[in-house]
C-alpha cells in the first residue's frame, strides 16, 4: 500500500470518461475522493444529458483499453460481464482507405472491446464505486474552484445541489474533468493568470448516428467498420459498430455544408454516396430503431497549460478539458485513460515526499503532452489536408501526409508494418515509430512504390486470407 496520504480530500469535477479513471488513480492517495457530477447518474447504461455524445458510437482504442486495465485490474472480465464484445483489431476491425485494397485479415495481437459509450461508462463507474473512499455526489453542478488567499493553490470547490443549495467543499487537489475546462479557466482568470495558449483546428464536422438491426450476412465477420473519406476531395465517411445489445450503430459524417441528414431514406442515400459501399451494404436492408441523432463538432482544441510556469498548486485539468480531438478518430476516451495512468504514476512517485503535491500539477501537465501529441498529430494530419480546415499548417504537412499514405500502402504487404500501423492508430505506440529507419526503408522501397498507381491507388490484389469481404458492391 502506498504511503497514504498525499492529501485529505481530492475532488473530481465530472463523472465522465476523464473523471472516473482519475478518481480511481486518486483513491490510493487521498483519504477521500469526491466526484461531483451535474447529471443524475443512472443505474443502467442509458445515455445522459451531460454527455450528449454518448448517443454516438464510441470506439475504445486498444491503447485506452490497456490503460483502463492498468487502472482497474481484471477490466476485461468487467467488460465481458457487462456484455461488451471483444475485438481483435487485425481480424474484426475493417478499415477502408479509399483508393486502396482492404487490409489483409491478420491477427496482430491488438485487442479491445466494442460496446456503447454509456455501457463503458457504467462499467467503469461500478468499478470506481467499489472504492470505499470514493464518494459520488450526482445532481451537483460545480460553479467554481476556490483558491487560497494568495491565489497559489486550490482550496475548495463550490457547487449547487439539485435543490439549488450552494455548498463549499474544501479540497487539497481538484481534477477538472468537466469536458469544457470552464472551472479551470475561471480559476486562472480569478487569480489573475493569463489564459492558456491554444491550438485550434476548425473542422466543422457533422455526425448523424442511427441504430439498426442488421442481418448477419450484411456484416461479414466484422465488429467495427470504418470507411475513411476520400480526402481532400471529399469528406464523407462512415462507421458501423456492434453494440452490446446485438444492434449496430451506423454513423455518417461530413464537413461544412456536406453534413449527413437525420432522415432515414436520406441517411441511406448519404451512405450510398460514400467512396465504398460497405456501410450502405450493411444498412440497406436493415431495420432502423428510433431517431437518427445528430452532433456538430466545430473544432479540435488543444490547450497548452504546460507552457505556464505559474499553474495553481493542486489543479489538474484532464481529458477534454485539456484537449478535444476530432471524434472521427475515436481517441478522446483512450487519451483520457492514459492521462489518468500518468496521474496515478506521479502520485506514486511523490507519495513519500514531504509535500507530494508541490510539483504535481506542472509535472502532470508536462507529462501528458506526449500522450496528447500522438492522437493530435494523427487527427491533425488528415484534418489539415482539407483546404477549408482552419488552423496553422506545419511546414512539413504535405510530406507527413505522403508518408502516412505510404505507410498504409506498405502495411498491406508487410505484416510488421501493418501491426505497427494498427498499434499507432490504437495509441499503443507513438506516431514517431512510423518514422523509424527500418519502417522508412520499407515504405520507400521500390517494391511498395511499384504497387502504387499514378494517383496513389494500389493495384488490386487479393487479400492474404480472403477473410476480408473486399469493398462491397453497391448493387
Ligand atoms: C460525437 C462524438 C463521438 C465521439 N466518439 C469517440 C470515440 O469513438 N472514441 C473515443 O475515445 N472518444 C470519442 N469521443 C470523445 C469522448 O466522448 C471524450 O473525449 C471523452 O468523453 C472525454 O472525457 P471527459 O471526462 O473530458 O468529458 P465527458 O466524458 O464528456 O464528461 C464530462 C462530465 O462532466 C460533467 N460536468 C460538466 N460540467 C460540470 C459541472 N460544472 N459540474 C459537475 N459536472 C460537470 C458532465 O455532465 C459529464 O458527465 C467522441 C466525442 C464526440 C463528440
Image (cartoon, grey):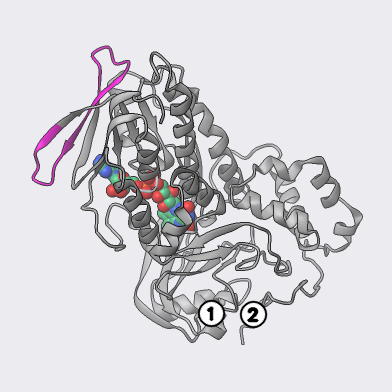
Q: Is residue 147 magenta?
A: yes
Q: Quadrant of residue 430?
A: top right
Stretch of the chain drawn in magenta: 146-167
**Quadrant of image for the N terminus:** top left
Which residue is at 43% across, 27% downward?
347
Name the outermost residue toward the right.
446
Q: Secondary structure at mark 2?
A: loop
**Cβ at disc 2 under 8 Å from ligand 1:** no
> Viewer-proximal residue, 416 or 146?
416
Q: Is residue 298 left or right of residue 127?
A: right
**Quadrant of image for the C terminus:** bottom right
Q: Judge whether residue 313 can be spotted in this image.
A: yes
How far separated are the C-alphas under marks 1 and 2? 9 Å
Q: x%, y% of residue 134?
A: 27, 40
Which residue is at 67% across, 64% downward?
97
Q: Residues within 10 Å of mark 1 (few under 14, many from 20)?
A: many
Which residue is at 56% across, 43% downward?
376
Q: x%, y% of residue 315?
A: 35, 27
Q: Which residue is mark 1?
A: 282
Q: Residues within 10 Å of mark 2 (few under 14, many from 20)?
A: some
Q: x%, y% of residue 266?
A: 44, 78
> Viewer-proximal residue, 321 or 87?
87
Q: Which residue is mark 2?
A: 472
The answer to whether mark 1 and mark 2 are in CB contact below 8 A is yes
Q: Secondary structure at mark 1?
A: helix
Q: x%, y% of residue 269?
A: 50, 79
Q: Is residue 261 left or right of residue 107?
A: left
| Residue 42: mark in rendering | none
> Viewer-proximal residue, 398 or 10?
10
Q: Judge whether residue 57 can be spotted in this image.
A: no
Q: Is residue 451 magenta?
A: no
Mark sitting earlier along the chain (1/2): 1
Amino acid at each position: 500500500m502506498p504511503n497514504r496520504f498525499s492529501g485529505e480530500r481530492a475532488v473530481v469535477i465530472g463523472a465522465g470518461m476523464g473523471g472516473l479513471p482519475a478518481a480511481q488513480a486518486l483513491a490510493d492517495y487521498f483519504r477521500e475522493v469526491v466526484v461531483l457530477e451535474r447529471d443524475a447518474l443512472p443505474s443502467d447504461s442509458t445515455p445522459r444529458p451531460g454527455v450528449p455524445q454518448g448517443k454516438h458510437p464510441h470506439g475504445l482504442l486498444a491503447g485506452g483499453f490497456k490503460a483502463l486495465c492498468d487502472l482497474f485490474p481484471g477490466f476485461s472480465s468487467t467488460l465481458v460481464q457487462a456484455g461488451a464484445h471483444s475485438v481483435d483489431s487485425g481480424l474484426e476491425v475493417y478499415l477502408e482507405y479509399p483508393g486502396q485494397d482492404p487490409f489483409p485479415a491478420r491477427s496482430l495481437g491488438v485487442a479491445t472491446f466494442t460496446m456503447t459509450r454509456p455501457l463503458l461508462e457504467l462499467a467503469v463507474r461500478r468499478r470506481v464505486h467499489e472504492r470505499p473512499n470514493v464518494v459520488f455526489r450526482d445532481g451537483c453542478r460545480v460553479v467554481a474552484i476556490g483558491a487560497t488567499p494568495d491565489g497559489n493553490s486550490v482550496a475548495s470547490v463550490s457547487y449547487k445541489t439539485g435543490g439549488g443549495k450552494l455548498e463549499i467543499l474544501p479540497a487539497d487537489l481538484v481534477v477538472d474533468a468537466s469536458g469544457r475546462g470552464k472551472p479551470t479557466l475561471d480559476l486562472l482568470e480569478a487569480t489573475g493568470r493569463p489564459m492558456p495558449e491554444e491550438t485550434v483546428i476548425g473542422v466543422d464536422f457533422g455526425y448523424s448516428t442511427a441504430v439498426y438491426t442488421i442481418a448477419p450476412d450484411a456484416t461479414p465477420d466484422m465488429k467495427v467498420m470504418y470507411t475513411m473519406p476520400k480526402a481532400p476531395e471529399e469528406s464523407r465517411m462512415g462507421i458501423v459498430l456492434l453494440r452490446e445489445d446485438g444492434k449496430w450503430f451506423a454513423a455518417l459524417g461530413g464537413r461544412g455544408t456536406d453534413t449527413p441528414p437525420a432522415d432515414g431514406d436520406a441517411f441511406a442515400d448519404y451512405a450510398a454516396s460514400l467512396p465504398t459501399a460497405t456501410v450502405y451494404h450493411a444498412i440497406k436492408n436493415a431495420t432502423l430503431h428510433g431517431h437518427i441523432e445528430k452532433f456538430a463538432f466545430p473544432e479540435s482544441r488543444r490547450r497548452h497549460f504546460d507552457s505556464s510556469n505559474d499553474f495553481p498548486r493542486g489543479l489538474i485539468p484532464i481529458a477534454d478539458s485539456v484537449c478535444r480531438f476530432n471524434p472521427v478518430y475515436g481517441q478522446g476516451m483512450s487519451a483520457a485513460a492514459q492521462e489518468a495512468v500518468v496521474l496515478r504514476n506521479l502520485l506514486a512517485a511523490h507519495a513519500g515526499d514531504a509535500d507530494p503535491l508541490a510539483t504535481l500539477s506542472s509535472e502532470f501537465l508536462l507529462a501528458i503532452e506526449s500522450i496528447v501529441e500522438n492522437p493530435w498529430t494523427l487527427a491533425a494530419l488528415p484534418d489539415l489536408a482539407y483546404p477549408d480546415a482552419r488552423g496553422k499548417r506545419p511546414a512539413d504537412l504535405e510530406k507527413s501526409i505522403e508518408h502516412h499514405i505510404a505507410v498504409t500502402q506498405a502495411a498491406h504487404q508487410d505484416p510488421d508494418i501493418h501491426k505497427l500501423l494498427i498499434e499507432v492508430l490504437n495509441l499503443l505506440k507513438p506516431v514517431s515509430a512510423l518514422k523509424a529507419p527500418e519502417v522508412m526503408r520499407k515504405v520507400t522501397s521500390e517494391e511498395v512504390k511499384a504497387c502504387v498507381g499514378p494517383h496513389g491507388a494500389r493495384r488490386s490484389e487479393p487479400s492474404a486470407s480472403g477473410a476480408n469481404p473486399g469493398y462491397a458492391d453497391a448493387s
